Image: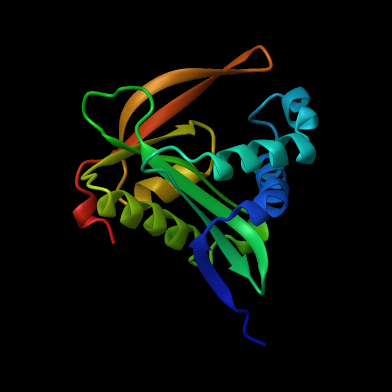
Amino acid sequence: MNQVTTIRSATLEDAPQLSRVHVDAWRETYTSIVPQTYLDGLAYQTRTERWRRILSEPQPHDGNFVAEVDGQIVGFSGGGKERQYDPEFSGELYALYLLKTHQGKGLGRRLFNAVVEHLVSHGYSNMMLWVLRDNPAVRFYEHLGGVRVREQELELAGEKLPEWGYGWRDLGAVR
């Protein structure tokens, strides 16, 4: 039986499902990378409130997208204006998470492309993202043409975790 997959803009009504995917994807992806105390502290209700705020008060140029399989949200992506005043990159992919059971089926690329298309439609010609160095998604971003351009540390639960910044200097070449 074929599954119906859809990539669409996120709506306020999606907040509870987005929260579930957000928390579950973090727990799947970051076990043994992020301190377990931080992962244990993730709460669906807190994330639902955060998603409601993000979706009800969007920043100019921000876009949030969901991947649905048979009507259930299984992943999301979001992007907009670069947030750290980087001199080289004006757009940023803020997040891209997909439940493990739905990885390797092209949905991650479609979520990535949704953000790229959104940024291009708002006049952005380049973008970057931050990813934990030990996140297996590093290979995914490299496969999509991302070039490592920055390094920094992120502190979670008192632990400093290395992050890499990946950049795409020409969004017109990403498809």
Q: How far across and how far down the image is residue 18, in percent?
A: 66, 50
Residue located at (20% from left, 55% from top): 172
Outermost bottom residue: 1
Q: Residue 28 appears at what percent x and percent y?
A: 69, 45
Q: Is residue 69 left or right of residue 111?
A: right
List x then y, in percent, for residue 9.
50, 59
35 over 113 or under it: above or below: above
Q: Is residue 157 above or below residue 32?
A: above
Find residue 40 and report its image quarter. Answer: top right
Q: Is residue 155 above or below residue 109?
A: above
Q: Nearer the viewer, residue 41 or 52?
A: 52
Kindly give the residue lying farthest to the top in the view shown: 158
| Residue found 29% across the figure and 62% down from its top | 175
* Quarter holding residue 160: top right
Q: Using the image as rendered, state which of residue 67 and residue 146 is in the foreground.
A: 67
User: Against 64, is 48 above or below?
Assistant: above
Q: Nearer the viewer, residue 98 or 83?
A: 83
